[in-house]
Amino acid sequence: MISQLNEHNKQEYPPMHTAEHILNQTMGRMFGSPRSRNTHIERKKSKCDYMLKKAPTEKEVQAIEDKVNEVITMNLPVTEEFVKKEDAKDLVDLSKLPNDVSDTLRIVRVGDYDVCACIGSHVENTSEIGSFKITTHSFDNGRWRVRFKLNELDEA
């Protein structure tokens, strides 16, 4: 499993992956949406799919971007802990985990804003993320796809 973790971590860009956690929580809080159904995270741009009854308005899209940036600027610590799967069921949604997952889960917290079972790479503090920008979005048959990028700290 450790080699799988290392292979997975090499491909991720920690600021973008942590921003995705914040976006997922924001979508849940604003729209009651479960975490992204399909996610593709890369350094330059990323995308997430959310199942929604209707497309967010342009005003709502701006509110999503604003909320993610507000959370980023809170300089929240990003921490991990290892929890028995039985104890994690009250903390996180276990429905997307594979059947052969181990009895101990890695739980990642973004301050008190988000908590998620995750094997990915993350920053240590949201201050390392930079600013979040929704570049495009589309709605088709109940799926809202949002594409986003980060303006890294040295670009800001």
Image (tube, rainbow, N blue to C red):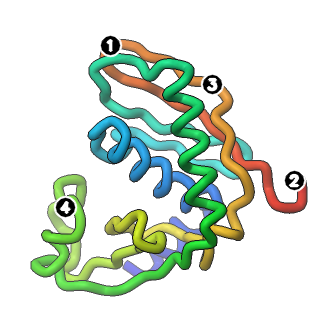
Distance (Cα) linking label 1 and label 3: 17 Å
Amino acid type assigned to the residue bearing label 4 in the image: Leu
Height in image: 131 above or below 15? Answer: above
Residue contact at pointers 1 and 3, CB within 8 angstroms? no
User: What element does badge 2 sit on?
Assistant: loop
Residue beneath disc 1:
141
Which dot marks residue 94?
Answer: 4
**Identity of the residue drawn at 35% across and 67% down:** 115
Amino acid type assigned to the residue bearing label 1 in the image: Asn
Which dot marks residue 70?
Answer: none
**Identity of the residue drawn at 54% across and 29% down:** 61
Mark 4 nearby-residue class (10 Å; few <14, some 14–19, many ≥20) = some
Q: Residue furthest left?
A: 86
Q: Earlier in the sequence, mark 2 or mark 1?
A: 1
Where residue 20 appears, as percent x and y from the top left, is 51, 52
Residue beneath disc 2:
156
**Between tags 4 and 3, which lies in front?**
3
**Between tags 2 and 1, which lies in front?**
2
Residue beneath disc 3:
136
Residue contact at pointers 4 and 1, CB within 8 angstroms? no
Where residue 9 appears, as percent x and y from the top left, is 56, 69
